[in-house]
């Protein structure tokens, strides 16, 4: 197990390093941030002064070497627009994103697991067909389309929720539901398939032969085994939800990492872009690593 953790940790470092390197060169090929900061009416001397102040006049590889040294020490510089540390801005945006992703996962589990169990217990019935149809419908809707639809119905027509913003719990409803659809369909299908598989195993038939009730067989034997892969998938998709949150947070003006990233890209605020992408890449790789270790711990077949 220690060898696995070491290998996963090394892969995690290489992935974060690769993503950060690609981002560094990609950003510097898209335009001059000094011209953006100076504004359209600035003179050439003013733009050049800002460029020297930011260290953009140094050779590209010198900038890259400085970037790597700062990366190791988690230094990303100050925001070019707000003149405050980029790390501070990103950490401030992390809390709303964690709240949104956490609530979305809770909503997803509370809906997907019962639906998957009901579909499996009533296999090939009209109820099973209805669940699979709803899942297919939800999976077919892009998040941006679903988000706009929810705003139109619940915020504009019915006026029961705010359409955007960050405040009380009502502001969280629409973005959490939209982001939940990102994972809901997958968990319903996975839960249904796993419950069907476990219900056909020998230990379940033995439990029934002993005279246990169907409720006891389901909750004490079948469901406990069927949910192990579901828990692993949730751990894997925890990081991926941060990627999906970029669209959702932009639609609902939710002040998380996604909205911060979009605003930074539009203004070419390099330090904030680098810090945000670095943090998202770190979250994704850490969650994937933990999911891999968790899978090996709960399933002995994967250790071979």
Image (cartoon, helix red, strand yellow):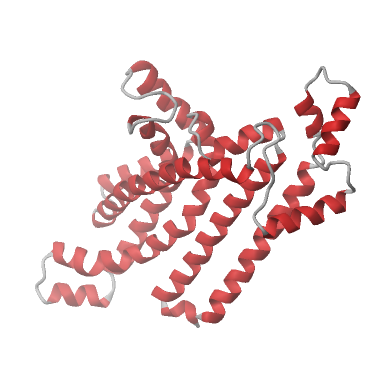
Q: Residue 224: name its quadrant.
A: bottom left
On the question of residue 230 being in view, the answer is yes
Q: Left or right of 144: which side holds 14?
A: right
Q: Residue furthest left?
A: 211
Residue 88, placed above or below residue 113: above
Q: Nearer the viewer, residue 186 or 4?
A: 4
- Identify which residue is drawn at 34% across, 31% down: 168
Q: Residue 213: name its quadrant.
A: bottom left
Q: Left or right of 69: which side holds 149?
A: left
Residue 135, placed above or below residue 282: above
Q: Position of residue 84 (x, y in %)?
A: 63, 38
- Identify which residue is drawn at 26% across, 45% down: 127
- Identify which residue is drawn at 48% across, 71% down: 293
Q: Left or right of 244: which side holds 54?
A: right
Q: Position of residue 160 (x, y in %)?
A: 31, 22
- Identify which residue is drawn at 63% across, 70% down: 10
Q: Position of residue 261 (x, y in %)?
A: 61, 38
Q: Position of residue 98 (x, y in %)?
A: 45, 46
Q: Nearer the viewer, residue 51 or 205?
A: 51
On the question of residue 142 being in view, the answer is no
Residue 100, placed above or below residue 155: below
Q: Nearer the viewer, residue 231 or 190?
A: 231
């Amino acid at each position: 197990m220690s060898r696995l953790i070491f290998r996963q940790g090394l892969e995690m470092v290489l992935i974060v390093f690769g993503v950060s390197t690609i981002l560094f060169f990609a950003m510097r090929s898209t335009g001059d941030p000094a011209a953006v900061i100076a504004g359209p009416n600035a003179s050439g001397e003013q733009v050049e002064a800002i460029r020297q102040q930011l260290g953009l006049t140094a050779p590209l590889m010198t900038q890259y070497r400085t970037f790597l040294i700062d990366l190791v020490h988690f230094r990303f510089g100050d925001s070019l627009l707000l003149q405050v540390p980029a790390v501070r801005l990103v950490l401030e945006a992390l809390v709303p994103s964690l709240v949104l992703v956490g609530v979305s996962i809770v909503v997803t589990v509370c809906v997907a697991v019962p639906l998957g169990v009901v579909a499996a217990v009533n296999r090939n019935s009209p109820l099973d067909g209805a669940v699979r149809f709803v899942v297919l419908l939800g999976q077919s809707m892009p998040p941006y389309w679903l988000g706009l639809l929810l705003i139109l119905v619940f915020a504009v027509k019915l006026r029961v929720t705010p359409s955007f913003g960050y405040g009380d719990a009502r502001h969280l409803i629409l973005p959490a539901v939209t982001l939940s659809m990102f994972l809901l369909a997958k968990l319903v299908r996975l839960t249904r398939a796993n419950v069907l598989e476990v219900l056909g195993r020998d230990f379940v038939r033995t439990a029934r032969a002993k005279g246990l009730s169907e409720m006891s067989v389901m909750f004490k034997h079948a469901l406990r085994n069927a949910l192990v892969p579901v828990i692993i998938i949730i751990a894997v998709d925890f990081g991926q939800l941060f990627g999906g949150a970029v669209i959702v947070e932009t639609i609902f003006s939710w002040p998380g990492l996604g909205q911060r990233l979009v605003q930074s890209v539009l203004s070419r605020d390099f330090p904030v872009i680098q810090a945000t992408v670095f943090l998202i890449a770190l979250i994704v790789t850490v969650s994937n690593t933990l999911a891999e270790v968790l899978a090996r711990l709960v399933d002995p077949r994967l250790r071979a």
